[in-house]
Each structure stands twice: as structure tokens, then as C-alpha cells.
Amino acid sequence: MDNPALEEFVEEVEEIIEDLEEGVLLLEEQPKKRSLIDRIFRAMHTIKGGAGMVMETELAEYAHHFENLLDKARNGEIVCTPEMASLLLSSIDGFRSFLSKIREGGDVDQQLIDKTLIQLREFEENAGQPTSKPPDKKTEEKTKEPASKEEVQTQEDEVKPEAVDPQNEQSAESVENKVQEEVQWDDEDEGEEIAYLLHLKFDSGMLRKGSDPILLIKELAELGDLDMIPHLGSLPDLKNHDPEDIHLWWSAKLVTSRPPEEIENILVFFQDDKNEVKFEPAESPPDDPGLASHGIYDEPEEKEQEQNKVDVSEVESNLEPEQIEGEKTKSESESKEVEEPEKEITTEPDSSDAEQQSLSIQKTQEPAPVKDTKKKTTESKATQSIRVTVERLDKLQNLVGETVINQARLHLLSDKIMEIDVKLGEMLEQFVEDNEKSVQELQDQILQVRMIPVGSILNNMKRTVRDYATKSKKKIRLEIEGGDTELDKTVTEQLQGPLVHLVRNSMDHGIEDSETRIKNGKDPTGTISLRASQQEGYVIVEIEDDGKGIDAKVIFDSAVKKGFINNTDELSEDEIYKLLFLPGFTTTTEVTDVSGRGVGMDTVRRDIEALLGTIEISSVLNKGTNTKLKLPLTLAII
């Protein structure tokens, strides 16, 4: 991609999609949790807005369809169901298809897009219950055949409250109560309104890059009451004006009950080194006098007097000389009279200005509430993190490697100089020792920069487990521990494939169906545990299940049958387990879309060894299997 704005958009949306997927999976478990619906809605809204800003209209329209679905869920018009979660997960696959098209070129998976949109339309027509409303009188009069109590109770999922006969009040009430209960949120309170001050100053060439600040302003206006002040100081004269350049910038006040994360999600696509885009809670008078002078910020009541004071020199500069002389004479004659009742004026406004003063007092008595403990600003965030491409890190790492080599050469040089001039050699040796500390610190820091939490790929397994469990009708629980354990980014990315295969193996070959587990005295829901930990310069990743385990005899017999070993060979249990990594080895006769072809475990071992790691398997029959991966913290050699 040659477009920096588009590249930034893709990177941001990739992160949003990860959060979106996690939110949908949580929503499936907690369908009545309002904050989850809001979280998913914000993500969809951000994707739509960002796509519009970079002129990806098809993606924006696609996101808009699902944003509407979530808006209906927020308003209680649709009940959150597992079918809705599946639909949202399919939409995420559609988003990934759009991103792949933007990043690599080519075409979007139109079949997938059309399929999800058809499913969306069918869901909106057939699934979910509408929010119950009081029966309409006209509807009651048109109802010819009153529904019996039994019919209403057995078909309550299909009956709308307004279609119930008014004579059968008890049945209608029970249906309405059921629908109300289904759409009752766990946490409906969206929070009190908070005022935020915004500073929006854009790169003059933004329009040429395919972005439009007006779209951002419209997005912000949807969150609450937005007051804007344009600043015209940098506007050129008509002769030098270029209609494709942006010369205006804005100060604004946004009053909203939405969380600050929603504002951040809108601004994030414009936050770079060329744009000055930031916001903060309106806790104190702004540095920008334009806000106060235009009424964007209301001064506290105790500062009202000070606000009304005017510098005489400023007034005189705008008056004619004769006006100044006349006003001075008048003010001198009335100064004593005004001096005494000054306090009364501030508390008892003149009747002619009563309306204006009362409005001002009302505003100052009810300032916008501010959460002191959660002060967030985009400016502070910008100083805490910055997005850097891996290519730049690789170049920096190579430079550090060269520095380490030069440090070693300096050691040799100091030894040779010591033979010629002891004093000079000692001075150089001291310098080399001091420099070595800095080089070592630099080396440690560059290695640390490449580290990312391994939880980024462990959490991706939630979707894999969920989709398999839904399709296979098995009950599977996924547990994740040690997600904050850090691993080199390169290692983490290459670990994704082996991890997916091992988790699928546990689901397909390890976890039994619920009936079998109950017969064996187990919990009907199987458990797969993913654990990560750091040990002596290595990261240990374990994939463990409580399934049926591995039968060593079955593996041995299958290996003999396929000609991998002889029937007379004597192998330990560990050696038998290693047979699983032979190319083409499988104990399954049935081929599925998950396993059975015998081309998986040998690939897993090869990928792990390419990362300079090892893989070990241990198992107890009817108890479960544990697969342990031992990986180096980094592949960097510097």
C-alpha cells in the first residue's frame, strides 16, 4: 500500500477486530450484559467511520448493516441469541476479507459477504423478540379471533404483544413480561454526562490523502451535544487559497454520556505526527481563550466576577479619542457610587439583565461532572505508545548488532594499546568498560521492544473452540492462563499455526461427547487449558485436555500396520508418542475437515523446531493429554 492513511486504517481495524471478536464471544455467554452490546456497537461504528474516512465505501456500507443490527439490540428491539453471535462472527470474517483485499489487492470474498448479508436479513425477519409495548387500541379492534391462553403460552416466541386479544389480559401480560425479561439489560445506566474539550487541527494536505475531517466531526456529533469554534487565523487570501488544502482548525466542547473510549475510537484514525487531534475532560479553564470567549467553557461561579473584568487598554484601543474622554469623565463621577454596591450586583442582578444573568448562574451552579479518577487524554496516550513497523525494528536490531561487534573490537584495540602505552591503554579500557554497560542496556531494550504478550494468540483460540463446539455439538470449555507472558513477536506469529492444530487435535481426538463423559463419571463439559509461563530464558506453552487420553497400544499397532516399525520393536511410552510426529501417521480412519489425513503433527514438529523449540507429549488413558512446547524468548542474535 502506498497510501499511509490506508495503511494506518488497516492496522487499526485489525486491532479493533480482535477486540470485536472477543466481545462477541463474551456476549454469547452473557447475552443480557448491556456493556458488551455497547462495546461491540462501538467497534462496528468505528470500523464504519474509519472506512468512510479512507473512502472504502463498500466496507463502510457492510459495517453499517451490522451496526444497525446492534443498535436494535441496544434499544431492545432484538434479543441477543447464539444465532446473533454466530452472525456477528461471520461478519468479522467478512471484515477480514475486506482488509485482505485492501492490503494485498485482488477481490473481496463476495460469496462470504453476500452470505452474511442474507443471514442478517433472515435473522432480522425471523429471530429475536420485539420490545413489548402497550397494546394499540386500533390493533385491539382489528383482532377478530382472540387467542386462547394455551395458544399464547405455547407460541409466545411468535406472538407480538399488540396482537394479543385485550380480553385475555393475563396471557398478554405474561407474554409482555417474558419479552421485557429477555431484553432486560444487566447494566442499563450509561453514566452521567461529561463535558470534553477537543482540539482538532489537521494536516493541510489531508484531503489529497483521501480523508475528510467533516466525517470525523459528524461522527463526534452523534455522541452528544457538540459545539464547534472554527479558527480562521491561518486562512490565506483568495489569491493564494487552494480549495484542496485545509486551513481551518477547530476547538470544541462535547457533552456526552458515552465513555471516553468512544471518542478515542473516532479520533484514532487521525492521530499521527501531522495532525494535532486530542481531547480531555473539561476540568479546568482551557488554555485556548477561544473556548471561553465563545461560551464553550463555563467558568465556575466563584470566578464569575473575574471573568467579567475587562482590561481598560483593550477597550480604549477600540474606541475613538472623544469617546474615551467622555467615558473617563463619566466613570470618575460615578466611581464612588459603584464601588459600594459591587457585591450586591454580583448576587442580585439588575432586572434588565435578569434573564442573561440567571442563565449564567444556572450554568455555573451545575458544572459538567468530571471523573477525577479516570482522567484520560489522547495526548498522554501518544507519549506512552507509538506504532512502529517491524521492518524498522529489524533495522534497529541490526544496528545494535553492529554496535556489539564494534564493542568487541574496542576491547582488542585497548589490549594492543596497553602494550605500547600503559596510561593511554588504561584510559581506553575504562572508556570501553563504561561503554559496554550502555551497549548491554541498548541490547536488552531492543530485545524487550520485540516482546509481545503471548495472550494475543491464546485468545484467538476462543473462536476456534467455539466454532468447533457449535458444529460438533460437543460441550467444550477453554481456560487460558499466563496470557501476559511475553515472547518475541516473530516467535509468537509463527506459533499460531501449530497452536491451532494442537487445539483442534484436543477437540477432535481428545474431548468426548457429553454422553460418553457422563458414562465415564466426568463433567459433561470437556476442558482444554492453555497455559504459558517463562522458565530460564524459555517460554513454556502447554495445551492440556481432560479427554480420553492417548492409548499407546493403539499407536504402536497402527505404526506396525503402516510399516513405520516392526512388531518386535521394544519402545518406551515416550518413544511411542514420538511416532505421532511421523509424516502420514494417523490412528483415525475417518477424514474430517479438522483431522484424519496424517499431515498435521509432523508439520507441527517441523514448525516448532524451526523456532529452535521442542515439543513433548504426555498422556494418561481416560484422564487426558498434555502437549508441552518449549520456545526461546527470541530468535534475535545480537
Image: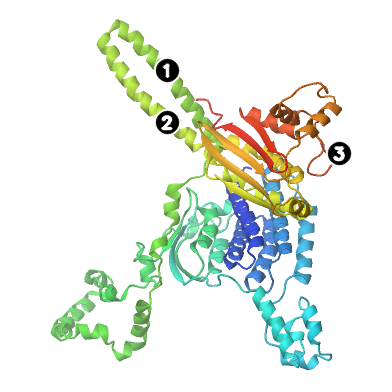
Q: Quadrant of residue 344?
A: bottom left
Question: Is disc 2 surrounded by few (<14), some (14 to 19) or many (20+) residues within 10 Å?
Answer: some
Q: Amino acid at mark 1?
A: Ala
Residue sitting at 45 percent across and 55 percent down? 378
Of the residues tagged 2 and 3, which is closer to the observer? 3
Question: Is disc 3 surrounded by few (<14), some (14 to 19) or many (20+) residues within 10 Å?
Answer: few
Relative placement, left or right, of 87 versus 445 is right
Residue on which disc 1 sits: 408
- Residue 370's place in the image compared with 109, above or below, is below
**Is there CB contact under 8 Å for labels 2 and 3?**
no
**Which element type, helix, strand or loop, lies under badge 1?**
helix
Residue on which disc 3 sits: 589
Image location (x, y in percent) of residue 87? 73, 60
Image location (x, y in percent) of residue 552? 75, 33
Relative placement, left or right, of 209 versus 338 is right
Q: Which mark is residue 144?
A: none
Task: Give the spatial CA distance, label 2 vs label 3.
Answer: 55 Å
Image location (x, y in percent) of residue 141? 78, 94
Earlier-in-chain disc, 1 versus 2: 1
Q: Amino acid at mark 2?
A: Leu
Question: Is disc 1 surrounded by few (<14), some (14 to 19) or many (20+) residues within 10 Å?
Answer: few
Earlier-in-chain disc, 1 versus 3: 1
Residue sitting at 37 percent across and 87 percent down? 355
- Residue 627's place in the image compared with 349, above or below, is above
Q: Which mark is residue 442?
A: 2
**Which element type, helix, strand or loop, lies under badge 3?**
loop
In this view, the residue in front, 296 or 184, is 184
